[in-house]
Amino acid sequence: MNRLEATRVVVAAAGDAPIVASLGHPAYDLFAAGDRPQNFYTWGSMGMASSIGLGLALAKPEARIFVVDGDGALLMNLGSLATIGLLGPPNLVVVVMDNGAFATTGGQSSPTAHGADLEAAARAMGVDAATARTEDDLRALVSGARRAPLVAVAKVSESAPTVRPPLDCVFIKQRFMAAIGNPESAAHPAGRA
Amino acid sequence: MPERPAWAAGVAAGLHAAGCRDVVYVPDNPLSHVLAEIGDRYRDVRLALATREEEAVGIAAGLYLGGRRPAVLLQSSGLGNSLNAVTSLVVPYQIPMVIVVSMRGDAGEWNAAQVPMGRAVRPILDAIGITHATIESPADAERLVALTAATAFGRRTMAACLVPRRITSAPAP
């Protein structure tokens, strides 16, 4: 399974649910798999996708929140697993697209190509986790039957994305917030001159 | 209910009055008074511990996207830890949040390791365009935090309220 195929599985499982994507190739593949207003594409803040997803999960307990992360990105914010384990949001599914490489920056090998085990790391922090090597395995993991919070490590090959999401960060945010029921215009307090 | 330093009670009251019901924090000693005050007096506020300040900013960003009005409590030393999320998520996406910064490295500092970042807090915030204000007296705390929140959620920006050591090191009443 390559990352685009795995991302399509996540999009299909999400339905109308929010998906937060880590910067670079995971975000590009999310756009390629199906652009939708409920996609929050990050253009920076490497490592923050799982934290953004955690905040969303706390804010919207009625929604299932999906995160499309990368192995290098999660390694940059490994403490996030401890916080997810601590707070235990029952509606957060973090899918780690683990290609064993920093693909966006040229394919440098990552620690997961040399034995670093993100499934084991998640379990060690008290978060249920599993590894999927096929689309069917991944589909079964993220379909909703399994209790969350959940870290699903998808072992993927590189998919060399050729398209990119919108560059306008404020557009991404406002479209996303409106689609998940928090239109930003409604939140803006009336000021006094 | 134990009496807490007036500045800490003011910070907690200001956050609550501004509608902040989610506080994400990396603790330090002075902030422990604010956290205890929130825990005792404002039971409708959710406190969330983060392992690192950048993570706290990421969680707060998600909370805002989900319709909340988040605040982040951190020590000045941790501002450096948070900067990538601030500059490449919070600023370009215009995600509002209040940050309350417990200052180190200013008057009364005994630990040399705290001084360089403490001195750099204001120049860094200025350089990346984050509005900041400093609590000048304990009685000022509630109003300044509320004003900081008005700046943040009105203008959709991060806004910082700095609490200097000359405030936090005063003996409790």
Image (tube, grey):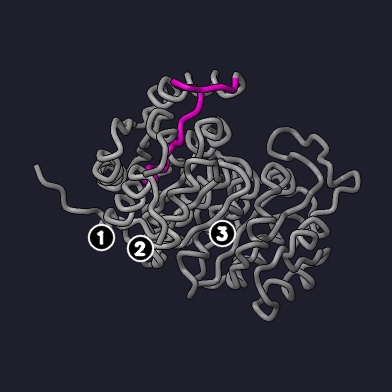
- At horizontal 30% and vertical 50% (from top left) the residue drawn is B14
Q: Residue under mark 1: which chain is it in?
A: A
In this rendering, the label closer to the viewer, 2 or 3: 3
- At horizontal 34% and vertical 42% (from top left) the residue drawn is B7
Q: CA distance from mark 1 to mark 3?
A: 23 Å
Q: Which mark is residue A182?
A: 2
Residue A102 x %, y %:
74, 39
Q: Counting residues from the N terminus, which is met first, the one under dot 2 or under dot 3? A: 3
Q: Which residue is mark 3?
A: A54
Residue B36 x %, y %:
46, 55
Q: Residue furthest bottom?
A: A145
Q: Amino acid at mark 3?
A: Leu
Residue A86 placement, left or right of B93: right
Dot 2 falls on a residue whose secondary structure is loop
Q: Residue furthest left?
A: A193
Q: Is residue B103 magenta?
A: yes
Q: Which residue is mark 1?
A: A186
In this rendering, the label closer to the viewer, 1 or 3: 3
Q: CA distance from mark 2 to mark 1?
A: 8 Å
Between A75 and B117, the one lying in front of the other is B117
Residue B110 placement, left or right of A143: left
